[in-house]
Amino acid sequence: MSKKTKPAMGEDTAIGNGAPAAERNLGNARNRRMRLRAAWMYFIEEMTQNEIAQHLGVGRVTVVRLLSDARERREIKFSIESGLPECVGLERELEQRFGLSEAVVVPLVATEADATKSIGASTGLYLSNFVRSGMKIGVGWGRTLWESLRYIQESPMSDMSVVSLLGGITRVKHFNPSEFSWRFSNLFQAECYLMPAPAIVDTPQTRQSLIEHCGLGEGFERAKSLDAVLLSVGHLAPSGTAYRDGFVADHLRRSMIGQGAVGEVLFHYFDAQGRLVEHPIHDCVMAAPVSTLQRVPQRIVASGGLHKAEAMLGALRLVKPTVLITDEAAATRIIELDRGTGARSKS
C-alpha cells in the first residue's frame, strides 16, 4: 500500500468562482465528501483528529475546519436516546415545583462553564420536533436563541407564521431581534412579521403614536392569537447582552437594580418574586406585554448559566412557562432558591 502524502496547498479547498461550472461542482462534491468522511471517522469510528488527518492525507487544522464546516452546514445531526440520571431528576423536580409540562436540563462540564451553546443546541433540537404546520409562533431574542439556529432542522412548514415580539435594535453589534425572527422563520419557510420600531422609544407618547398611527397595533393584536412563544431571560449584570453591547444605558440598568429587579424578558423588568417593578421604561418598550405572553398556550423559556439563576426564578414565576430548557447548574440553583423563598413567593 502506497503511503499517502499531504496534498499541495489549496488542494482540498473549494475551487474558485472563476473556474467553469462543471469544475466548481466537482470541487464542491469533493469537499462535501471530505467533510462527511471526516465526520464519520470522528463521531462514529471515534478516531482522533490526528488519526483522521493522517488517513485523509491532510493537516490537522484542515480536519478541524472540515468538522466545523459539517456542523455549520447541518450535515451532522445528534440524537441522544436517554438522559443523564442527575439531569432527569432535576427535570422532574422543576416540572413538579413550577407546574411545567416539560423541563429539559442539559449537562455541563463544570458549574461555571458557559451554558449558552449547550442550551442553544438542546433548544434547537427541541424546536425541530415541536414546530408544526399552521403554527403561529412569537419569538424573543438573545445569545441562547441565536445559538439555537445552528441546531434547528430546516423543514418547510405550510401556513406557519413567526412574529417578532420585540422591536429591533437600532445599533446592531451581535444580535438583533429582527434578524433572529427572520432567520428562524426562514428555516421553516414561514411568514415573518417584524416590529418595525426601536425596542425602546423615548416617551410613552411616541410608543402610543407608533401603535395607533404607524401600523404597529396590528403586531400587538397578532401576538394575542399565538400558539406558542419562544423566550429567553436577561440578567442585570454588566456582562448581559443588552448592557455589554450598549443597547440599554448603564444608568438604567443600575436604576432597575435599585428598584429590586433581578432580570428581564423582552425588557419587562421583574423582581425575584416574579413581579414587574415600577419603572417608566415599561411605558416605552415596544414589546408584547407580559399579560399577552401569559395567555399564550405554549410558553417556552430557554436560558441558563449559574449567574442567571435568580433571574430565571423570577421569570418562572412571572411568565409561568410550560417548557423550560436550561442547564444542570442553573436548575440546581433555581430549586435551592425556590426552596428558600418558596413559602414567601406563594403567599
Image (cartoon, rainbow, N blue to C red):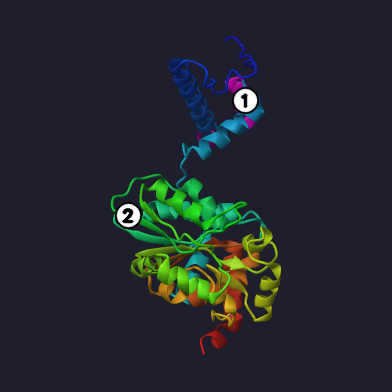
With 136 as the anchor, is 56 left or right in this view? right
Amino acid tagged 1:
Ala
Q: Position of residue 29 (x, y in %)?
A: 46, 23
Q: Is residue 101 visible?
A: no
Q: Is residue 68 above or below residue 244?
A: above
Q: Residue at x 65, y 76 (%)?
A: 256
Q: Residues within 10 Å of mark 2 (few under 14, many from 20)?
A: some
- Work out whether residue 325 or residue 198 is closer to the camera in this orientation and state it: 198
Residue assigned mark 2: 160
Q: Which mark is on residue 208? A: none
Q: Which residues are magenta?
A: 43-57
Q: Is residue 3 visible?
A: yes
Where the N terminus falls, by quadrant? Answer: top right
Q: Position of residue 120 (x, y in %)?
A: 53, 54
Q: Residues within 10 Å of mark 1 (few under 14, many from 20)?
A: some
Amino acid tagged 2:
Met
Query: Magenta segment: does it hold 265?
Result: no
Q: Residue at x 58, y 81 (%)?
A: 277
With 46 as the anchor, is 188 left or right in this view? left
Q: Is residue 146 above or below residue 101?
A: above
